[in-house]
Image: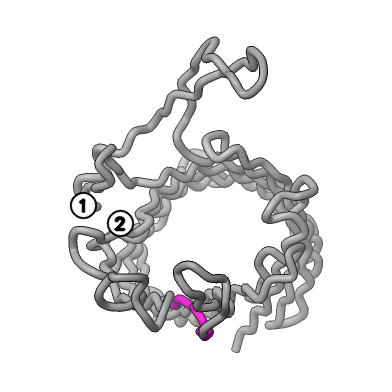
Amino acid sequence: MHSNWLPQFDSDLFYEFGAYRQSIEGIGTFGANVTFLNLGKQYITGEDSPEILGEFSSYEFALSGTFGTKLNENWGVGVGLRFIRSNLSDVGAGSEKGDGKANAFAFDLSTLYKMPFLPKLSMGVNLSNLGPKITYIDAAQADPLPTNLKMGLAYRILDSEFNKLTVTADMNKLMVTRHADGTSDAFYKAIFTSPWTIVEKERQNIGGDNEKTVGQTKIFNGIISGGAEYWYSNLIALRMGYYWDKPGKVTFMSFGAGIQYSLYRFDFGYVSAAEGHPLANTMRFSLTMGF
């Protein structure tokens, strides 16, 4: 899959993803994937001057191996192991020792269950990026990996030879706990201590640059999304989704389409965000090949 990031700013950022999977009868399915994020060209300037003293490129990538198998006809489990390389800078910043390069390891756990009494309904749970913090300079300044909990449902409304329609809904919750002093909990503590709600304050302008708090409400500290996918005769796919991130004040709709012939499939996705939104006009292209 390929996607350009922040295209409206003519940026040189882009995202690439590639994967391979192989099923072995009686054992399970093995997989491997690589994720690459190009963060573009960066410039070195003086501390008190905008004069460009040099330049370098930043990027990050991850290599993963996965395995999944069925425990019974309706229940499957999976595990993944990941190596992460972050190459933000070739040199340190200011008086900091070291540079902006770091390595990390993480693992994923997942399960998928199909209801025996509702065969068209599937439920999934995934914990991803479980692992130690990533360290660039020293352990005191280490950053937690974005450990994420995802829970979702999928229901196949139509499942005939020529028409298939599936609706989905899922929840994403970042399982990271940061404290007021800037420190953060280890991932095995954060998955239990990360707050599920946050307080959103309602403010009112009382003149000039002055505001006052007139109320507050608790909101879910995560992301909720949903979507639908329609396939006609395993040939043409149409997709639509909605993304709701109240804490981050990000909401948008997405649309997509796919075409499949034999063992080959091409997919396209488009984010329809408001003008000026960082993700506005983001497009994703992917190619799937079977053999």
The amino acid type found where label 2 is placed reads: Pro
Picture coordinates of residue 278, whole percent (x, y)? 68, 54
- Looking at the image, the residue that sits furthest to the bottom is 291
Magenta region, mostly helix, strand or loop? strand
Is 67 one of the magenta-colored residues? Answer: no
Which residue is under mark 1? 186
The magenta segment is: 54-61
Residue 258, picture quadrant = bottom right
Picture coordinates of residue 180, whole percent (x, y)? 28, 37
Q: Which residue is drawn at 77% across and 54% down?
A: 255
Q: Residue at x 26, y 68 (%)?
A: 135
Q: Is mark 2 on a helix, strand or loop?
A: loop
Which residue is under mark 2? 144
Q: Which residue is drawn at 41% across and 28% down?
A: 197
Distance in Å between CA atoms under marks 2 and 1:
7 Å
* Vertical side of 123 occupied by 58: above or below: below
Identify which residue, 52 or 80, lies in the foreground. 52
Residue 174 left/right relative to 281: left
Is 59 one of the magenta-colored residues? Answer: yes
Confirm whether residue 64 shows in the render. Answer: no
Identify which residue, 31 or 243, lies in the foreground. 243
Residue 129 left/right relative to 37: left
Identify which residue, 157 or 40, lies in the foreground. 40
